Image: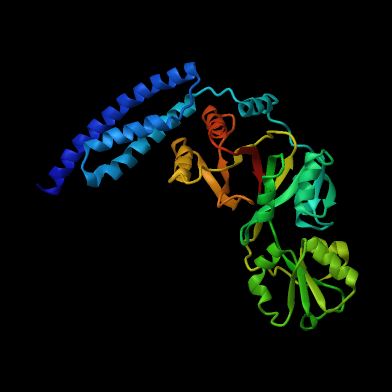
Amino acid sequence: MDLSKIRDEIDIIDDQIATLYGQRMELVKKVSSAKKKSGKAVSDPNRERDIILRVTDLVEEDNKAYLKRVFETIFDTSKAYQTANADYDSELNKKIQTAIDKGELKFPVKAKVACQGVAGAYSGIAAERLFEIADVSYFKNFDGVFQAVEKGFCKYGVLPIENSSAGSVNQVYDLMKEHKFYIVKSIRMPVNHNLVVNNGTKKEQITEIYSHEQALSQCKKYLEQFKNTKITACANTAVASKMVKESGRTDIAAISSRECAEIYGLKLLETNVQDSDNNYTRFILIAKDMEFYSGANKISIMTTLPQNAPGSLNKLLSKFSHLGINLTKLESRPIVGSSFEFMFYFDFNCDVREKGVRNLLCELDNSTEQFTFLGAYGETV
């Protein structure tokens, strides 16, 4: 047989598969209705296993593993349909509905905001760009920001979450597991670093440079020229500038923002010293209560996956794929004290008001050991 004839036969079989798939999905609709009435979960692992065991007996050994994958895909699309049309009565769904019922809130002009560091820190600059009037309180570390919001000392908190050059801020991700909060907005802000010094300092005199570890990472190539200079990480770039100013020394420098130089009366010895001109840091704005502001088109969640379950991440990703949801970030962090267990963080673009999206969130909440809805929000660029 030539290739065209073989393909003609394949086309005939494909048409039969498509017809049978349509018939199967009609029955899935009935299954979905029955599950709604009985309150049964969408996923039924025992039923899926029984089907795999039965159908793989119908093909040769070489095709069994491939057929298993075909049916796993069929199961995924069936569950995606059921999820999109399910009615979940869960605490998460009630909380989301309560927030939706408030309507699209207008973003406030003035707010009390918690930030890490001291005056001039990039988090503070981000707060001032988010709000027309930002009453900023500074805290020693990121944990202090989370606690200030959690305990109601500040309405909001600003935290750096990732940088386009240096990657994720792991400290913030790790602290997410320990606090209760919601992301209500984010901002992607260009970050330009500068070498700042006390008046009278010359470049060749510098013996030590201070900055935050993320900033140092973003200026790694630039710093290679300082062969015999000590590079010291500190709490943040604003703290570095303050240390240089208060020391009065002319043999040390800091890498920080232009705003820091102005606040602490330092000289810009060299500007834009970051390795990439396309250097952005993304900051999240957190609040104690779930709030949806106008333009909320991004959702963040964190969840664990079943241990020792092959393909568990792939199965989770397929849930997003079958609903046409665009994942924009996937981050994993080890859970302290566990045996090789990870927390996974997802960002994706969609509207929390869509029924299928809310059903997926509720399904994950009901079916995973640890699941947290971090918020639905818009991002300012």
- The number of discs equals 0
Image-quadrant location for residue 252:
bottom right
Q: Is residue 358 above or below residue 147?
A: above
- The residue lying at 23 percent from left, 47 percent from top is 62
Residue 328 rendering spot, x and y as whole percentages: 55, 47
Q: Is residue 54 above or below residue 198?
A: above
Residue 229 rendering spot, x and y as whole percentages: 74, 79
Q: Is residue 79 above or below residue 348?
A: above
Residue 362 visible within the image: yes
Q: Is residue 133 above or below residue 243?
A: above
Which residue is most to the left? 1
Residue 318 rendering spot, x and y as whole percentages: 44, 40
- The residue lying at 75 percent from left, 66 percent from top is 211
In the image, 159 versus 55, the foreground residue is 55
- The residue lying at 16 percent from left, 39 percent from top is 9
Side of 356 where 228 appears, left or right:
right
In the image, 23 versus 104, the foreground residue is 23
- The residue lying at 51 percent from left, 42 percent from top is 306
